[in-house]
Amino acid sequence: MDKQLSRNRIVSRVAQELQPGSLVNLGIGMPTEVASHVSDEMGILFQSENGMIGISQEPVTADNLDVDITNAGGQPVTTVPEVSYFDSSLSFAIIRGGHVDATVLGALEVDEKGNLANWIIPGNMVPGMGGAMDLVTGSKKVIVAMEHCNKSGAPKILHQCTLPLTAKGQVNLIVTEMAVIEVTDNGLLLTEITADTTVEEVLKATGAELRVASDLKIFRKTV
């Protein structure tokens, strides 16, 4: 599948998990695209850990670009009229205080216990973990948006993460281009598959045991 089509499928499905009137943090990369699939009528406010609430779904253009307004990844963003700005200490107080209803993050690996590895591959230089550790432990719901396998075709959903962890046991839901998987006390539960895949294909592409829901559904919306 075309990479952009795959990403669109993932983020459009993630958007369906967000509740009206909620406060949501979107991680850098693919998760930022979730905002474009959320209608204004839902009243969702997007927070960025560098110090703002009120990131708009409107794309950045030459006409509305403000180089001083960026998300936590340094990417220029637009804002809603009621945007609020504050320093990083207040931003992290909001996160650590449990006021963020949901956070959407990418991942390098997730395992059947809800452990998350998304910040480093040993040997690669990275600026640091950023706010991910705080977000996954402070948010009420943690959604991972990622492709089912890595570039080499190896599963990213594993029995046990092999990379350094961002947090232990914090992931609630995994959404890929193939499936929706809930993290439960009894392991991973396959609840939805896309219309162009099969349960057998999902099981084969997953490096962990999956239980299949008795009421398995097809993605409500696919691209």
Image (cartoon, grey):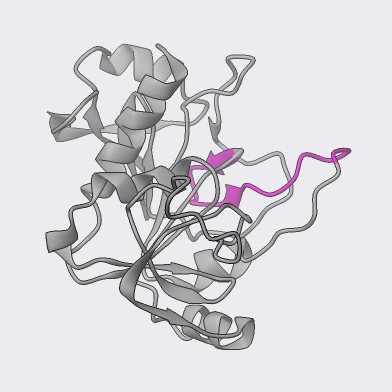
Left or right: 165, with 190 as reference point: right
In depth, the one of 127 and 68 nearer the eye is: 68
Q: Which residues are magenta?
A: 109-124
Q: Residue 101's image quarter? A: bottom left
Left or right: 184, with 21 as reference point: right
Left or right: 145, with 169 as reference point: left
Q: Is residue 117 magenta?
A: yes
Residue 6 location in percent, x, y?
38, 23
Point out the image quarter for the N terminus: top left
Q: Is residue 23 magenta?
A: no
At 33% from the left edge and 52% from the top edge, which residue is drawn? 58
Residue 125 location in percent, x, y?
86, 44
Q: Residue 45's image quarter? A: bottom left
In depth, the one of 63 and 113 nearer the eye is: 63
At 60% from the left edge and 85% from the top edge, which residue is drawn? 87
At 51% from the left edge and 64% from the top edge, which residue is drawn? 136
